[in-house]
Amino acid sequence: MSLYLLEKKIRLNLKNSNKNGLSLDTDLSNKGSYVLYIRGSFRGLHINVSNNHGKVIKMFSAGKLGFKKAQRHNQVSLELLIEEVIKFLEEISPKLTKLNIILKGFSVKRKKVIRFILKSSIKPFVVSIIDLSDIPYNGCRPKKLRRK
């Protein structure tokens, strides 16, 4: 299945999740299936854990752990952030059967995050890793980058 069709299928599932009058908690079709959204930006890394219907269960970021400004991009803050996410996923692991990872945005740390997750005890539950980053096809001119 191509990436475009998979993205369309996920969006349709999110859009039609509550049309039949079923509540999100009582729908038994995808119990134990979770989605891990990893959004990288120049300002930091944000990770959301949501159920299969798109309802966010928990949000993580380096800023919430107490790191400010430039410290949010350190290797140490990244490791602590991933440890928090893995600890939370291990808490719900009796319910966890499938874990889809969706990457958005461009960040240097994305590969390291995936490596940490695949080295952890959650690796058997990972079903797919999808990259949904927006790629401009000669669209708007990007902002001028900050000088280092």
Image: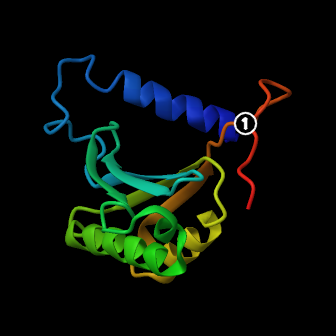
Q: At 44% from the left edge and 81% from the top edge, which residue is drawn?
A: 120
Crowd around label 1: few <14 · some 14–19 · many ≥20 (10 Å): few
Looking at the rendering, which quadrant does residue 107 occupy?
bottom right
Q: Position of residue 121 (x, y in %)?
A: 39, 81
Q: Residue furthest right?
A: 138
Number of numbered discs on residues:
1
Nearer to us in this view, 46 or 88: 46
Residue 122 visible, this orientation? no
Q: Residue at x 47, y 71 (%)?
A: 71
Residue 23 appears left or right of 88: left
Q: Position of residue 93 (x, y in %)?
A: 25, 69
Q: Quadrant of residue 1?
A: top right
Left/right placement of residue 142 relative to residue 19 reads right
In front of the other: 12 or 40: 40
Placement of the C terminus among the 4 image quadrants = bottom right
Q: Note whether 146 is above or below 16 in the view shown.
A: below
| Residue 148 at least partly seen | yes
Residue that numbered label 1 is attached to = 143
- Could you tell me the amino acid type at mark 1? Lys
For label 1, the SS is loop
Residue pushed farthest front?
147
